[in-house]
Image (tube, rainbow, N blue to C red):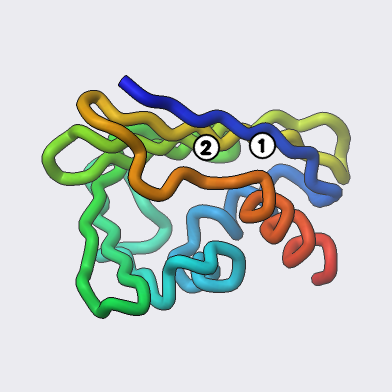
Amino acid sequence: MQENKITIIINKPIEEVFEFTTNPKNTHLWIPSISEEVAEEYPPKIGTQYKNRGDNSDWDFYKVVDFQENKIFTLTDLDGNYHVRYTYCKLSDSQTEMEYFEWMENGELSNPFTEDIIQKLKSVMESN
């Protein structure tokens, strides 16, 4: 199993960070490898399916497997091999710690998130 964990502090209330990172309309604003993302319903719940695509126009499909508002948002690919979990912690009324954790049950992460991607999220959120 390969895993990748990045933690960041964002100077926004937890509700805003949670809403922004779970809303598929925002994903392309901070993840450069994704040009479009849609969900079958929003706000999501356990079982909600998301799909996204990059420049190659192929869709990748995911489903929500854990959802606790303003606490945890976890997706897995449809075969259950790739997982990504966002964990949110309120530090103050205007500051949130977010942990991004991704892992594979089998194999290697083909395109693991980097500190630059999470910094882009922070920059986009704090500029609004």
Determine whether 48 is above or below 29 in the image.
Answer: above
> Looking at the picture, how far across and down is residue 106, in whole percent?
21, 26
Question: What residue lies at 71% left-to-right and 43% top-to-bottom?
Answer: 14
Q: Secondary structure at mark 2?
A: strand
Looking at this view, is 89 or 83 the one in front? 83
User: Of the numbered discs in the image, which one, if any, rests on residue 98?
Assistant: 1
Q: Tell me whether the residue at label 1 lies in contact with that at label 2, contact meaning CB atoms closer than 8 angstroms.
A: yes
Looking at this view, is 57 or 17 the one in front? 57
Question: What residue lies at 29% left-to-right and 35% top-to-bottom?
Answer: 65
Question: What residue lies at 83% left-to-right and 30% top-to-bottom?
Answer: 91
Please state which amino acid type lies under the numbered disc 1. Met
Q: Secondary structure at mark 1?
A: strand
Quarter of the rendering occupied by the C terminus: bottom right
Question: What residue lies at 68% left-to-right and 57% top-to-bottom?
Answer: 121
User: Of the numbered discs in the image, which one, if any, rests on residue 86?
Assistant: 2
Please state which amino acid type lies under the numbered disc 2. Tyr
Quarter of the rendering occupied by the N terminus: top left
> Looking at the picture, how far across and down is residue 94, in whole percent?
87, 45
Distance from label 1 to label 2 (Cα)? 7 Å
- The crowding category of the residue bearing disc 1, from other C-alpha atoms within 10 Å (few below 14, some 14 to 19, many at least 20), is many
Decide which of tag 1 and tag 2 comes sooner along the chain.
2
Q: How many marks?
A: 2
Determine whether 94 is above or below 34 in the image.
Answer: above
> Looking at the picture, how far across and down is residue 125, in whole percent?
75, 62
Outermost residue toward the top in this view: 1
- The crowding category of the residue bearing disc 2, from other C-alpha atoms within 10 Å (few below 14, some 14 to 19, many at least 20), is many
